[in-house]
Amino acid sequence: MTDFQIITDSGCLGDMSFYNDNGIDIIPFQAIIDSKYYNLDDKFPLSNTNIEKIISSKKDFIISKPNYLDLKNIYERHLKEGRNLLLLHSSSCVFDVYSRANLAVKELHQIYPEREIILIDTQTIACGIDFLIREVLKHDELSLYEISNFIKQINYKISSRIIINKYDLNNKKDYKCLFRKSCVLRENNGYIIPYTKYFLTASALYNELKNMRKEIDINYPIVYLVCANDDVYAKRIIKTIKKHLNVNIIRLEPNALLLNLTGKRTIGLFYIKR
């Protein structure tokens, strides 16, 4: 057993039974369905099946996230019981629990200076939260400080694969185009191509696809493409991918709610009302 408590939230995309079996505390989001509140937990999981039922029934559906006080109270309960904390939350525009958690952590550091509290933004974790937690649990002999460094090492190994110094055919100039390839996990049943501000030209995509084609596995035939809201631009990227890879492309908008990424089935794509 680790000497610290791992806490995350419903934004994690894994198997709920795995988290329960390993004593990981999950702070549930709430689904507001026709003005009724439901915790998104193992009794009502954030799953394709449940969301599809809600959408098909044409009910109003909003996801409500925990506020600052909710987070602080949960963290403090573990601190009072003598545990150090490893907190995993996302700063993405979809989930954004990280900023609220950060406020709670700053306050709790002053109240419990003898306790270690490490907050990690899962948006920066290229290897995926499921893989991260599994690796952490394998190294229960490490202290929380050592675990923090261990996580940085894992993330660096996976996220440091970039394309650099590609050629701009329009301007005839060399430039640095950074494109982090997130072949996140084989167990994700596919690959993720993230759209970032550095992903500027078709040439960067073309070179990346050549590399992916060499290592693509027939058992993982899906590409999750997170691309711009611009429909014309997205279609152009998808057309380029299809020229080079025999894969099923699933397009995701940047503000989409990603479901069941680690599962066998195709993920669902739904939107959170603002």
Image: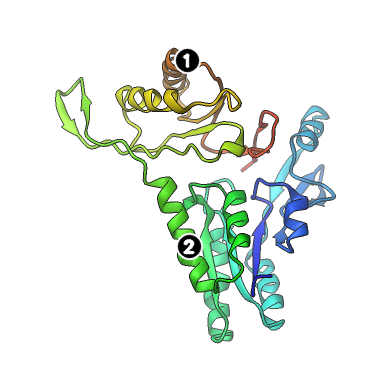
Position of 176 with respect to 58 (left or right) is left
Position of 223 with respect to 61 (left or right) is left
Q: Which residue is mark 1?
A: 242
Q: Earlier in the sequence, mark 2 or mark 1?
A: 2
Residue 6 at x, y percent in the picture = 64, 65
Q: Residue at x 59, y 67 (%)?
A: 86
Residue 69, image quadrant: bottom right
- Is residue 135 shown above or below 139? above
Residue 238 at x, y percent in the picture = 47, 19
Q: Is residue 40 visible?
A: no
Q: Residue at x 47, y 54 (%)?
A: 154
Tell me the quadrant of the picture where the C terminus can be found. top right
Residue 109, image quadrant: bottom right
Q: Three-letter amino acid code at disc 1?
A: Lys
Residue 211 at x, y percent in the picture = 38, 27
- Is residue 256 shown above or below 25? above
Position of 34 with respect to 144 (left or right) is right
Tell me the quadrant of the picture where the N terminus can be found. bottom right
Local crowd at mark 2 within 10 Å, few (<14), some, or many (≥20)? some
Q: Which residue is mark 2?
A: 150
Q: Residue at x 59, y 50 (%)?
A: 131
Q: Three-letter amino acid code at disc 2?
A: Phe
Q: Residue at x 58, y 28 (%)?
A: 220
Residue 243, image quadrant: top left
Position of 56 with respect to 189 (left or right) is right
Residue 61 versus residue 4: which sits nearer the camera?
Answer: 4
Residue 218 versus residue 46: which sits nearer the camera?
Answer: 218
Q: CA distance from mark 2 to mark 1?
A: 37 Å
Between disc 2 and disc 1, the foreground one is 2
Are the two marked residues, 2 and 1, in contact with CB atoms closer than 8 angstroms?
no
Residue 92 at x, y percent in the picture = 52, 49
Disc assigned to residue 159: none
